[in-house]
Image (spheres, rainbow, N blue to C red):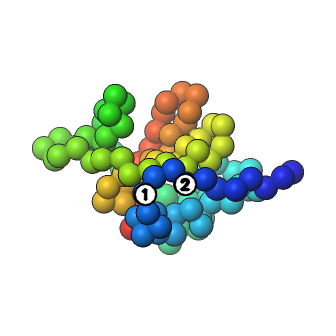
Amino acid sequence: MSIKEIIVVGGTPDQWGYIPGFLDPSDPRPVKEQFNEKYLGGWRPFEGFTLDENNMRLIASGDPPTELIGFIPFTPKETVVLFEHSWVMILQNDTKEWEVCRMD
């Protein structure tokens, strides 16, 4: 199995922090499992956001929209999306299902 590189689209190294380092392209496990193991706080999905798919913004009732910063097209099945305020989304490319977690 060849190891692909992690491609980060958008954002700065300071905005992404250690997040790309939690991902291993040679690990066959889903992103959620890799984050859960390697991120100190684990992967803890947050309920309460909706996604404005037209503008790729997270919406929480009563708050201004949370803007997209960048993304990592990690596998054909999963994309990691970074939003303002350290909100990270795992997007299932085929079903468009997603979970979001604060990773700061």
**x then y, percent, for residue 31:** 60, 51
Which quadrant holds the C terminus? Answer: bottom left
Above or below residue 36? Residue 74 is: above
| Residue 53 figure quarter | top left
The residue at 36%/60% (across/down) is: 86
Residue drawn at 62 percent across, 47 percent down:
74
Q: Secondary structure at mark 2?
A: loop
Place of residue 103 in the rendered image (x, y in percent of width and height, measured from the top left): 42, 63
Q: How many numbered markers are drawn?
A: 2
Would residue 3 appear left or right of 96 to someone viewing this image?
A: right
Instruction: For residue 32, say whether it is visible.
Output: no
Where residue 20 appears, as percent x and y from the top left, is 56, 62
* Residue 75 higher or lower than 25, as above or below: above
Mark 1, residue position: 11
Q: Are marks 1 and 2 in contact (CB under 8 Å)?
A: yes
Q: Secondary structure at mark 1?
A: loop
Q: Which mark is residue 95?
A: none
Left or right: residue 57 compared with residue 43: left
Q: Residues within 10 Å of mark 1 (few under 14, many from 20)?
A: some
Alpha-carbon span between mark 1 and mark 2: 8 Å
The kind of residue tagged 2 is: Val
Q: Residue at x 17, y 46 (%)?
A: 64
The residue where tag 2 is placed is 8
Compare residues 100 and 45 and report the one nearer the observer. Answer: 100
Residue type, numbered disc 1:
Gly
